[in-house]
Image (cartoon, rainbow, N blue to C red):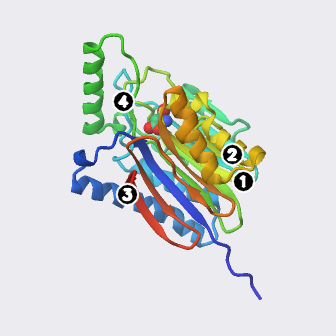
Amino acid sequence: MNNPPRPFALAIHGGAGVIERDQLSAVEEASIRADLDAALEAGRSILANGGSALDAVEAAVVALEESPRFNAGKGSVYNADGKHELDASIMEGQTRRAGAVAGVETIRNPVRLARAVMEQSPHVMMIGAGAERFADAQPQIERVANHWFDTDTRRAQLDQEQTRERTEAGDESLRGKYFGTVGAVALDSQGNLAAATSTGGMTNKRYGRVGDSPLIGAGTWADERCAVSGTGWGEFFIRNAVAHDIAARMAYGGATLAAAAEAVILQRVPELGGDGGAIAVDRDGNIAMPFSTAGMYRGWIATDGSRGTAIFLQGD
Ligand code: ASP
């Protein structure tokens, strides 16, 4: 007799930040939720057919990168030079293999290149011109001109930020200038975990700035216990090794997934002055999605098949 299929779980985020309820029109909100749902579906169809957590997180993140509504792939924010520099990473729990790219400018789906670094190179992370050169030898990696990532919304955000910087001289803080980084975490029916994260970074970031999203242990982590993808003020996520700290609290301290994720996101990061959120799943399929910002675009499919999307703190 065949064993019944083991349950799977999936969670995604489309970024944490200042998401004001009254500034989000019903039409925009519906489009965002539809895009979150399409990303969930991309991951679900793989997991439901016995596919791997790694394939599922990659597919979900590609779907979010393709949406102009999130700050990853199409719709990425602009740096201070009016260009886009994209970062992404991916990690597989049971093998602890990982791949990452930072500061890439012509890669339509940076998470795919991160996976290629993991599988087709002896390295974990490649950056800028070198990563682009590596991509030249990867026919499956689609290239686009940098302006392909442009959107009017992100351009307006850059203009607004640069005006603010001129009028509030000396304040180069990136506070509150993010939302839309995307990520996915999954548990597959084999019991394996994976995580992936992709971003355009933060609006008006200085050329060459790299945040937490492509850094294994800061923005992304997966091991045999849990998988984590973060979003928020990247400098603080790096300084707190956020994704790995969540895993370490479970491994060394015996914390539950929820307690570990909440301690790091709701206490450690704010204590230093940062904010943001994370999604995480453990090997039993528990899901945690804490955030300290006004909102976080997110979606989930639990082990019992229940499914949803949410934006605000109240869970709606
Ligand atoms: N964490 C990202 C970064 O600092 C931004 C975000 O999550 O929206 O690049």
Pick whichever of labels 2 and 3 is earlier in the sequence: 3
* Label of residue 225 in the image: 1
Crowding around mark 4 (Cα neighbors within 10 Å: few <14, some 14 to 19, many 20+) is many
Mark 1 CB lies closer than 8 A to ligand 1? no
Task: Say what amino acid the circle numbered 3 marks.
Answer: Asp
Of badges 1 and 4, the one in the foreground is: 1
Q: Left of 44 or right of it: where is 192?
A: right
Q: Left of 31 or right of it: where is 9?
A: right
Q: Left of 178 or right of it: where is 96?
A: right
Rendering coords of residue 27 (x, y %): 22, 56
Quarter of the image with the C terminus is bottom left
Q: Mark 2 points at which residue?
A: 247
Crowding around mark 2 (Cα neighbors within 10 Å: few <14, some 14 to 19, many 20+) is many
Q: Name the residue under label 3.
A: 35
Question: Residue 83, located in which quarter of the rendered image?
Answer: top left
Q: How far apart are marks 1 and 2 (CA)?
A: 7 Å
Crowding around mark 3 (Cα neighbors within 10 Å: few <14, some 14 to 19, many 20+) is many
Q: Name the residue under label 4.
A: 78
Pick whichever of labels 1 and 4 is earlier in the sequence: 4
Q: Do the residues labelled 2 and 4 touch (CB within 8 Å)?
A: no
SS at mark 3 in the image: helix
Q: Do the residues labelled 3 and 1 touch (CB within 8 Å)?
A: no
- Residue visible at 41% across and 60% down in the picture: 309
Task: Say what amino acid the circle numbered 4 marks.
Answer: Tyr
Q: Which sits in the foreground, 28 or 247?
A: 247
Q: Distance between the residues labelled 2 and 3?
A: 29 Å
Direction bottom: furthest residue = 1
Pick whichever of labels 3 and 1 is earlier in the sequence: 3
Q: Which sits in the foreground, 143 or 284?
A: 284
Q: How far apart are marks 3 and 1 (CA)?
A: 29 Å
Of badges 2 and 3, the one in the foreground is: 2
Quarter of the image with the N terminus is bottom right
